[in-house]
Image: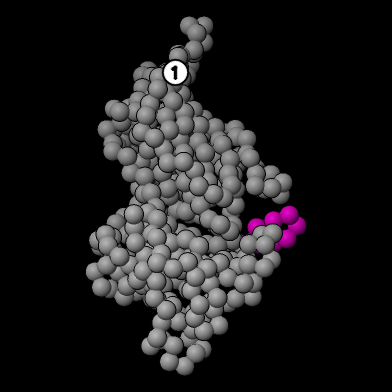
């Protein structure tokens, strides 16, 4: 069984997040802390890096820049080094950045991360646990990789993010990994209107995306401390293979509750969906005047075409028959 260690330096969104960074002592776990916001899309380019001197253990390194999404976070791989161990097996060092892709604190789903060679696992699983809100760079060292007596070529490896019953994201490290990249990258949907005024609701449509990596989780997340205040983050789960979700985010005045906000989404093929989980309301830390609302619409099938979002105030008589409609288009 591989042995895993890590070291990382976190760049927190504010000082309170530094206290969220803890070293995991479990044998197969590595913790990561990161900031909200988007990372650049990974470029599919590789560059060889000079190996160590003959006096040191034999090492082979590549610089790589690939990004994949999984469970609500993005994972950017920027460097891989394979080093021969005294026992004849390989130690692999990964330089990884993780970003929680949410405007408010979110409990992202946790992938099981593994190294594969031509689709076959050559390491045990690593658990990468993002914080609810943040960004960090992380160096993960995976020991006892592959068979004894053979130094693995990092150009033949791929980093895989997965979980039982969930979609897989694949980041090939080199051209000879034997696997195609699968990044589960969200697709931005452009709305025909930026505001939705219906009944008592005054909403700003801040984001609409077609997601392949995550959706809302009906199970609430555990409270986490922000400074000295307990805070319940938005709860997310990973999508199943072949499953999609349209994620719609609204900004609303503080005190807005979503219980009477009636939403439906019409897919390009004509199917009309209600939200897959109850509409979520999560406060903004440091913004007491604003609350974030989130709705997810899960489905299988084709994704190309135009989506129509309908909103109504359930407390207004007859409002369901006269919803406000907003179209959502990719590209």
- The x and y percentages for residue 189 are 38, 59
Question: Which residue is at the front of the view, 91 or 266?
Answer: 266
Q: Quadrant of residue 303?
A: bottom left
Question: Which residue is at the front of the view, 227 or 125?
Answer: 227
Q: Would you say 92 lies left or right of 202 here?
A: left
* Helix, strand or loop for the magenta stretch, by majority: strand
**Measured along the vertical axis of the image, is residue 54 above or below residue 238?**
above
- The x and y percentages for residue 46 are 38, 26
Q: Would you say 172 lies left or right of 7 here?
A: left
**Residues rendered magenta in the picture:** 222-231
- The x and y percentages for residue 38 are 50, 47
Q: Residue furthest top?
A: 54
Q: Secondary structure at mark 1?
A: strand
User: Magenta includes 224?
Assistant: yes
Q: Residue furthest front?
A: 193
Q: Would you say 84 lies left or right of 225 here?
A: left
Residue 211 visible in the current orientation: no
Residue at the spot 27% in from the left edge and 33% down from the top edge: 178
- The x and y percentages for residue 27 are 54, 38
Residue at the spot 49% in from the left edge and 90% down from the top edge: 316
Name the residue carrying label 1: 49
User: Magenta includes 112?
Assistant: no
Image quarter of the C terminus: bottom left
């Amino acid at each position: 069984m591989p042995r895993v260690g890590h070291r990382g330096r976190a760049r927190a969104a504010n000082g309170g997040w530094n206290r969220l960074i803890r070293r995991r002592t479990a044998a197969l776990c590595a913790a990561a802390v990161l900031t909200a916001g988007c990372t650049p899309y990974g470029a599919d380019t590789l560059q060889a890096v000079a190996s160590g001197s003959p006096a040191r253990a034999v090492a082979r390194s590549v610089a790589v820049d690939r990004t994949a999404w999984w469970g609500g976070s993005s994972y950017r791989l920027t460097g891989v080094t394979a080093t021969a161990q005294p026992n004849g097996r390989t130690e692999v060092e990964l330089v990884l950045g993780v970003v929680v892709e949410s405007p408010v604190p979110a409990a992202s789903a946790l992938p099981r991360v593994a190294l594969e060679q031509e689709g076959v696992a050559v390491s045990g699983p690593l658990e990468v646990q993002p914080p609810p809100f943040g960004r960090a760079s992380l160096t993960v060292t995976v020991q006892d990789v592959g068979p004894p007596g053979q130094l693995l070529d990092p150009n033949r490896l791929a980093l895989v993010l997965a979980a039982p019953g969930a979609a897989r994201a694949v980041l090939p490290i080199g051209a000879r990994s034997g696997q195609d990249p699968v990044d589960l990258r969200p697709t931005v949907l452009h709305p025909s209107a930026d505001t939705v005024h219906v009944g008592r609701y005054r909403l700003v449509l801040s984001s609409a995306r077609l997601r392949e990596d995550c959706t809302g989780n009906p199970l609430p997340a555990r409270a986490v401390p922000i400074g000295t205040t307990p805070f319940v983050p938005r709860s997310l789960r990973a999508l199943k293979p072949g499953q999609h979700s349209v994620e719609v985010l609204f900004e609303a005045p503080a005190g807005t509750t979503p219980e009477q906000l009636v939403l439906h989404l019409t897919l390009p093929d004509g199917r009309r969906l209600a939200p897959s989980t109850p509409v979520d309301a999560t406060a903004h830390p440091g913004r007491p005047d604003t609350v974030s609302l989130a709705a997810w619409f899960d489905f299988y099938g084709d994704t190309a075409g135009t989506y129509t979002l309908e909103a109504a105030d359930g407390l207004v008589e007859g409002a369901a028959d006269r919803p406000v409609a907003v179209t959502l288009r990719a590209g």
